[in-house]
Image: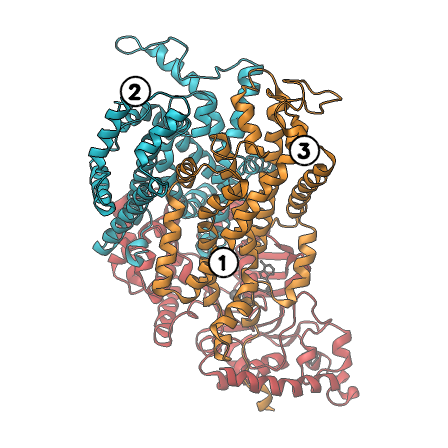
Amino acid sequence: MTTAFLPETGPETAPTEEPAIGTRGLRASVRYWLGNWKLSLGLAMIIGLTGFSILGSYMVDFDLTKVAAGDFNARPSEKYLLGTDNVGRDVWALIIHGIHPSLKVGLIAGVLGTAVGVVLGVVGGYYGGNTDAVISTMADIFLTIPSLLILVVLASYIRTTTLEFTALVIAIFAWAGPTRLIRSQTLSLRERAFVPLAKLSGQSDFEIAIKQIMPNLLPYIMAGFVGAVSGAILALVGIQILGLGPLFTPNLGMILQAAYEGAAIFRGMWWWWVPPTVALMIIFISLFLISLALDELANPRLRERAK
Amino acid sequence: MSLTYILRRLGIFFLILWVASTLNFVIPRLAPGDPIAALIGDMEEQGATVENSAELINMFRERFGLDDPLPIQYFKYLAALARFDLGYSIRFFPATVSQIVAAALPYTIGLLTATSLITFVLGILAGALLVWHTTPQFGRAVITFFMMLAPIPYYLLAIIFVSVLAFSLGWFPYSGVVSVGRLPEEGFDFGYIVDLVYHSLLPAFSIIIAGVGGWVLGMRGMMVTVLGEDYLTLAEAKGLKDRRIFLRYAMRNAILPQFTALAITLGYVVSGATIVELIFSYPGMGLRLFEAINSNDFPVIQGITFFLVVSIAVAILIIDLIYPWLDPRITYSRK
Amino acid sequence: MTVAIDSAPLLQIENLRVYYWTQAGPVKAVDDISFTINPKERFGFIGESGCGKTTTIMAILRLIKRPGRIEGGRILLKGSDILSLNDEEMRQSRWSRISLIPQGAMNSLNPVMRVQDQIADAIVTHRGAVPIRELRERIGDLLETVQLSADVADMYPHELSGGMKQRVCIAMATALEPELIIADEPTSALDVVVQKAVMETLIGVQERLNASMILIGHDMGMTAQVADRVGVMYAGKLVEVAGTRELFRQPQHPYSQALISSLPSIREKKRGGGIPGLPPFLLNPPQNCLFHPRCPHAIAFCRETPPPMHRLRPGHMTACHKLSAPEQFDSAGGSDSGAGAAMAGAGTEASSGHQTR
Ligand SMILES: Nc1ncnc2c1ncn2[C@@H]1O[C@H](COP(=O)(O)OP(=O)(O)OP(=O)(O)O)[C@@H](O)[C@H]1O
Ligand code: SF4
Ligand SMILES: [Mg+2]
């Protein structure tokens, strides 16, 4: 009788030490995420905009985005859906051909920045010590020095001619944010019970990093990525408005800059400056909604409570 | 506060300065050829005539010893920086970069220090109230709306404001810092100040409204964490009044990480709000930077950049040094 | 026993229910429990982790947070129901009448306030402004009653050891001389030597104030030593209430028996007793007697009918059919096969649990 009453490990330790996304919670989280309006709305907005731009590119002639392709300063009409600018470019065509390159810059810089960030962050957070000190100090410095200005200085020397090159330049600053985020999360994951356990069971550091830590970092990696994309697009627009980007590849920053230079506001040419402004707002707000949703995934306490 | 702590912070301070100034040194030299001659060549190519170009080139050569080997150039450069000698503007030669900075700085600091502080206070309070249990539903909705503006760059708002409030409705002036031709009179000129503030309102609004959301977001996150802490439960169990718990227990703790961000923001003040200043033709650092970029006035670009880095580094150093006073735990843990 | 039956009880809990409305459904953390606490009495609560002890006492302070809600019942403090107080009245009775030494006392002090200010906060809120000098003196005295030097008043929480923080919490809890002190595992985060000293301090202070005390503890040895009466909780239900000596000598409910018989083997006082099987998942609990899946005596009747709280003797209550309806067990003849399987499974679980320790 008494042998059956031997003490066992308290069951209460199990749930709290469980990985953030355990297999048990997976289905529940999927269900939760389908119902999260921020995620669905954000994704719908960004996917819709991308689709609109890519599909539109096949339907709207690219030549319309060239100087003197149409009348100058034309109001919106049947011929020019969103009018033309002061050098005869069709704004509707500019927008359609300008959205996806802007997103592409965000994507390139975002992917590069996040990839570097994940590697450095995991290495720094997992190994600690001097490696970590160097990595996190560098990331801190890159986060505090004014990246846009340095980019401006860089861009003013290396007059960038292609958007891809601009994206690479932007990527120089895109890694610091994700690195810091991933590093701090790795650090706290390392402390949690399942990592030492995996160590005891003889898994190598690499295996642990891939099998134990990575899955739990996923929401943070995604959040870092979304942040990097958004930051890169912001930087692109900034560089463009300052007149340092490629001037003839359509993109949202370039349209906005042309509108500013052409005094669109004061000439009442709303069709020129409103569309790029709205498109940029949709991009920034949708990415923001997605990152809010990811925050909630990583930190359930932020979730809206059922009333 | 331990000595190690201070030394460590000072170390980081100099490290930031060093990295930034080295970048500033290296980048121009990545371009092939003599940087100064190339610059002036560039400008002449574009049709600009640079007066005294020979004199200018010589001045630079001499000052920076451009014929010296690179390491020596580098040390001369650092030495000049240490004296805040940022060289001459190419466009406004013989004006020095420091003079140009000094002329623009008061406007920028006036506009941005005020707006940054207002934004901070509003954002912090709103963010804390957003997750506080007594906040009415309507208040939450308003705060959430402003939070949703967080990702929108302030210049997009500025464009919209100028278009609607200044251009269409004519409620505000849309450019300049005072009315055209208005000069301050002798002594205390109240009307001038009113004019100045009036001209700053619209840029200020766009900066504040676009900026509040970011603080709301950060504060909300910290508040949610703090609200889950045991000391909050105990404060409530103690029967303290709601307002006291909110201010002294919840906000007081949640605000700590925000101070670092505030310091960085204040450090950024000297860079001006480039694009907003551009849109409103506000003669601050941002506008000067823009002009410098457009006229390839590299010494000014670099000077402003360097000046900004110094200002940010100083701000971070200051916050790091007063942080132990804000958070008593820092003294011990040193990080 | 020191149970003062004739004097009016200080606290009466009647049919209290507290549910947490999680996304997956209600968690019945406290489900229809009733008990009383007499003046000057020390009432101990025992039960496995997650059985609802903290929820019960937080309900007494009306500090249940969303998604939790008090669903019903009455909490009578000296005869008046605190659930009917408005928020301001409730705020005023917190601490001045009922104070708390919280479960996470390690983290219960505001890290950016000096100890003195935190204690003063409680005093000034309820008693109005007091001259600084007087306040300092009072706080110094309070700290002395918990064997701390008056200098502690000027320190920040991070400058104190765990035991010191715990003592500060005790000093704070007694600052307004409340009628009831609730101590939620006041010593569980401390090492053994300090535990004993802190507990002695706590008891000393409580006796000096003539206050009643609710004491929650995982350490049943400690509870057995200090409590006058003990309530055993299981999965949101109170299954047995009795005088301490009686309960520990002759536990009547099968769960209490299991809990108490496991006592000697866990002298190192790990959390949780050594009871085979897991405590029920409260989202989807077993029906009627919640203990039946783990109970060696369970019969079909236990699964079909909820056991009522039954008075065995004056001052000894328990909720088990075996005690209230023994005739059912004669006809059923022996234990249920389901429970036997649970026991067998538990044996292996228990031994594997032993290894990881
Ligand atoms: N905020 C909450 N949301 C959902 N369920 C909760 C919440 N807080 C507690 N519970 C549930 O209520 C039950 C009782 O919890 P409670 O904290 O009262 O247990 P306890 O007996 O104090 O445990 P311990 O000994 O570990 O302190 C648990 O099953 C727990 O899962
Ligand atoms: S009622 Fe039945 S199952 Fe419940 S404790 Fe008593 S004997 Fe066991
Ligand atoms: Mg508890």
Q: Is mark 2 within 8 Å of ligand 1?
A: no
Q: Which residue is mark 3?
A: A62
Q: Write down which chain is painted orange.
A: A
SS at circle 2: loop
Q: Write down which chain is painted cyan.
A: B
| Crowd rating for badge 1 (residues with CA inside 10 Å; few <14, some 14–19, many 20+) | many
Q: Which residue is mark 1?
A: A118
**Occupied quadrant, residue C297:** bottom right
Q: Are marks 1 and 2 in contact (CB under 8 Å)?
A: no
Instruction: Using the image, name the chain to which the residue with label 2 belongs.
Output: B
**Which hue is chain C drawn in?**
red
Q: For the N terminus of chain A, which image quadrant?
A: bottom right
In the image, is residue A148 above or below residue A86?
below
Res. B147 in view: yes
**Occupied quadrant, residue C310:** bottom right
Q: CA distance from mark 2 to mark 3?
A: 44 Å
| Side (left or right) of A243 relative to B148 | left
